[in-house]
Amino acid sequence: MGPDYVRPETAPGVTGWNAELARGLESLPPDQAALARFWTALDDPLLTELVERALAGNYDVREAEARLRQTRALRKIAVGRFFPTIAGSAGAQRVSASDRTRGAGGGGAGAFGGGGSGAVELYSVGLDASWEIDLFGRLRRNLEAANADRDAAQEDLRDVQVSLIAELALAYVDTRALQERLRIAEATLASQSETYDITDWRAQAGLTTVLDVERARTSVATTEATIPTLRTALDADVNGIATLLGEPPGAVSELLAPKQPIPVTPREVAVGVPADALAQRPDVRRAERALAAETARVGVATADAYPNLNALGSIGLEALSPAGLVKGGATFASLAATATQTIFAGGQIVGSIEAQKAVRDQALARYQTTVLSALSEVENALVAYAREQDRRDSLAEAAGAAERALVLAQDQYGSGLIDFQVVLDSQRALFVLQDQLAESEGQVTANLVRLYKAIGGGWTPEPTS
């Protein structure tokens, strides 16, 4: 009963990416092994160690694993309903003379032929069996739904793993970027402090004015003010990484304390075509399996409108003493078949079918929304990765020019050719550009991580047999 499931067409008419692929990105199908462990392309052993610890200890992953075990157990129940249910029974009954007399309709002799006034004991053992015959496919549709629920839970676990790895990689990259920005701020502060000391000495010697000293002090204080903010953000990232690993805050502080460079992106990345990404993304796969489950449940609801056929049977022994059961007492057996059909239920069955069809249509809408969101996420990741590379290159050129300008300003100020304010402005400009460059370097790598997540990187498909 009910409709046979047909997998919906995925993004019809979408054959390529709308965004132009940036340098290093190729539309070749991605290597599955490399995509499954995309973080190794960043060539950072510590990041690889953290990912492995997170997959083993993260509580969201454990919760998703428990949901998968639950759906597997429910599938066993669905399979078990195809087989007869067999129950054993054992009983002992003591019947008094008056009870037997009433049972015999008031006659003189006992029901068991034992004439006197004493009690009679009756012992029995037996087996009862019942079996629902799946005449209209209700059980088959139920198993079909259970299979799809199990598959959806599997994809949900994969989606949790993909999100976890991406979130961890992003936090790790941001940690290294903040460490680099903190290093730049501290180096700039040391340089500005040195400039302040020289200016103060020159003012005491009457070679410059107090105004220059106060300007130098302002630059020092302004740079000092940026350091606490960077340290706060860095501590938050380190604590966030510990949480993702399923460990208390501070658990990885010593591990991440030594400063390491920002992970560098690989020269080439294969992103495939839209069909590749949609086939790889666990959230799309999960939505499709959820649609299959709800479609199967339409069949379950439809089958309820048809007769339910059951076979019943019993077999056992009866005796007047426990020893009689061992010796083979009187046997009894029965076999029956029952068919039940709901004749009137006030529209409940029709309503149930219509409601399940509405649930299926909701699942279809969610699937279609998931597909569009997935395509949009990949497109946005492609654009962000390309634009940030352009921004990084411009900032690198600007930072190089600012560094050369500062050297010239210091030389010309030492020769008395320019005002001291030019030196301070050059120092501030260099600091701002170096800070933005470090941030952009981190963003380039972070955007690549987001791109890997968007195309479904972070899990390994099972080999097909």
Image: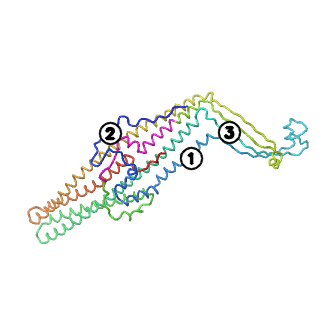
Stretch in magenta: 266-295
Check disc 2: other Cα within 10 Å, few if <14, some if 14-19, many if 20+. Answer: few
Give residue 189's mark.
none
Magenta stretch encompasses residue 83 = no
Residue at 29% across, 42% down: 19
Does 18 appear above or below 326?
A: above
Q: Secondary structure at mark 1?
A: helix
Instruction: Please report contact status of discs 1 and 3: CB closer than 8 Å, yes or no.
Output: no
Magenta stretch encompasses residue 293 = yes
x and y percent of residue 62 in the render? 49, 53
Query: Which amino acid, mark 2?
Result: Gly
Mark 2 vs 1, N-terminal side: 2
Q: Secondary structure at mark 3?
A: strand
Q: Main secondary structure of the magenta part?
A: helix
Residue at 49% across, 33% down: 358
Residue at 32% across, 46% down: 381
Whether residue 143 sits left or right of residue 92 in the image: it is left
Find disc 1 in the rendering and name its residue: 73
Q: Nearer the viewer, residue 139 or 114?
A: 139
Check disc 1: other Cα within 10 Å, few if <14, some if 14-19, many if 20+. Answer: some
Query: Which amino acid, mark 1?
Result: Ala
Find disc 3 in the rendering and name its residue: 130
Real-space Cα distance between discs 1 and 3? 22 Å
Mark 2 vs 3, N-terminal side: 2
Give residue 16's mark.
2
Query: Which amino acid, mark 3?
Result: Ser
